[in-house]
Image (spheres, helix red, strand yellow):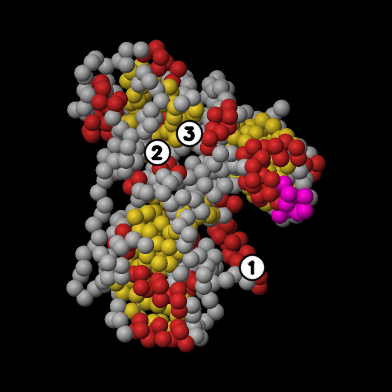
Amino acid sequence: MTVALAPLSGVRTDGAGFFAEGAEPWLRLELDAAALAGRWIVVSYDAPLCAPVVRPLLAFGGRSAERREILPAPSLGRGIWVGRVPERTTEIAISPVDRAGPFAFRVVAVDVLSRGRRLATALRNRPLRGFAAHALELVDVEAAERPMRRAVAARPLARYAKWRALRARAPEWSEFDAPTAPPGSPRVRVLTASDAAGAAPMAGPWPGVELSTPADGSNVTDALRGLGDRDLVMVARTDDEWADGAATILAVAASRDEADVLYADEELASNGRLHPRFKPDWSPILAERADLFGRAWAARVGWLRAHFGAQRVRDLAGEPLRPAAGAKAFHVARPLLRRADAPAARFDASVPPAPAILAGKPFATLIIPTRDRAELLSACVASLDRPGGRTDYHAIVVDNGSVTDEADRLFDRLRADARFEVMRIDAPFNYSALCNAAAARARADALVFLNNDVEARSSDWLADIVRWTPLRGVGAVGARLLYPGGTLQHGGVVLGIDGQACHFERGGDPSARGFFDRADAPHEISAVTAACLAVERAKFEAVGGFDARNLPVEYSDIDLCLRLGERGWGALMAPAATLVHREAATRKVAKSQESRYAAEVAHFRARWAHVLRADPYFHPALSLDWHSAALG
């Protein structure tokens, strides 16, 4: 039974629908929230298939401090969230959209999840973790909540077919999913093979969809006659299965966005199993190397005619659609096409050349904060000059109050090398302030922040990250970091995990292809760690460097990446640069510091609440309770 929703804040209704007055409208769930306090619940909710794909927010209010949860997006029409209601909750609210304007949304059900069902689900999803969480729950309910959520709510990708069956719903085109076609909306021409009738269900109710079977051997320009530049073209292959109404969904998205190409997610059906191919939002650097569009795309007629007009339609249907330079694309985060074959192999793409050596000017300035632990810094410095790598750097070692004789002797040796300077700062540890002070003395156009507990593994690691920094749309550039044992420590940061941010796929196999097969290719990411972070000095200075006042230690690197991103300089992973990171080998977190870190976490979450909800490079249907790709 549907749970009634009532306007709470930032939203109004006229009885026929809701209107959001800002980016975070709240609706109250009309139910006895107090009766659910302390219990595990399952919330099921629907959003229209033509609406923007958004992760809803769930808020628990009452006498205890309000807590918010970021929910999985209903990418197939329905979303499901599993979690525990905080004690003393008296009200539950939901924020379904993240922009002003009219919207539709419904909460289908709120069910209590019994201990038996919860344990069964946890053991089925993650047997070892489920058992451990259950054992902890018998001792400490509060401490067990997060581990239990990870076991219950994060389903392995291998369970996609069952996960999908609970979330894919039939379109309700005449009511809930009814599309709107404002004046000037694009027409859609679907190019098909001889079996045009088989493509009919993909059209949906959009008024301007037509199916066309071009003559054999005709080129793209001929097949597009009669269409305007802003109209859309899709290709329906006989061996692909498009979702019902796919053309309608893409046409509605095109009426809101001026992209040259709109692309959707795909499903791969092989060996009797179904696998999701969830894609990141538009990532032009990744798209030069990976088949980001696949076959689930709709292109503007003008763009397609300009770049592919002379091609045969048959070739357009058979070859991957590679974006031309400067193309603008928009991701519709819904699986709209099922295919039987794997996507194209990795494309060949050029890599930006490393900046040339300029007379009297270093290639990069390395900034390495340190305190004592000479053995770590010595290993770090020694690894910088691997055979075949760049050595024309300037390094500033920031000594934050070292007291050991070993450190003093090492500093003396470094001063004897013209490339090094040692900068002494005697002050309480403030990572952001130390880095900012050193950056002000940099000699090079590129800054590389480096922890003293990292060691270069690849010879050309420095060139591999610095070469990206001059690009117009690139801000912070990160390296792939490994634990000493060889597992992955850092391959990029995903926002929203555990309500904050997390090194994605930490502890995994570094040879694995990773989410969307991008682990070994340069790719856009929301943030990278400053254990090894390169950035153009002018961009770093433009955003004021690290936030030394609000984020002296925790989240300062992620905050820097996001502030760069606000200026149009997105973060990038350059996995060719590989280093070993002995994480936190120098800095140990004491209990007396926890209150300060809690304040930093609170500031970070408040400052970036709107971004944590919507990491553009992590699919919104995936779980934020697991540290690698899992179904949410």
Amino acid found under the numbered disc labelled 3: Pro
Q: Which mark is residue 276?
A: 3
How many neighbours does mark 1 have within 10 angstroms: few (below 14), some (14-19), or many (20 or more)? few
How many neighbours does mark 2 have within 10 angstroms: few (below 14), some (14-19), or many (20 or more)? some
Quarter of the picture containing the N terminus is top right
Q: Nearer the viewer, residue 457 or 450?
A: 457
- Residue 104 sits above or below residue 134 on the image: above
- Residue 30 visible? The answer is no
Magenta span: 133-143
Residue ID for mark 2: 330
Quarter of the picture containing the C terminus is top right
- The reply to whether dot 3 and dot 1 touch (C-beta < 8 Å) is no
Q: Residue at x 19, y 28 (%)?
A: 310
Going from N to C along the chain, the mark reached first, 1 or 2, is 2
Location of residue 14 in the rendering, given as x and y in whole percent from the top left corner: 63, 32
Disc number lying in front (3 or 1) = 3
Location of residue 167 in the rendering, given as x and y in whole percent from the top left corner: 58, 30
Disc number lying in front (2 or 3) = 3
How many neighbours does mark 3 have within 10 angstroms: few (below 14), some (14-19), or many (20 or more)? some
Residue 537 within the segment the image draws in magenta? no
In the image, taking residue 103 as reference, residue 569 lies left or right, namely left
As helix, strand or loop, the secondary structure at mark 2 comes to strand
Residue ID for mark 1: 594
Q: Nearer the viewer, residue 105 or 377?
A: 377
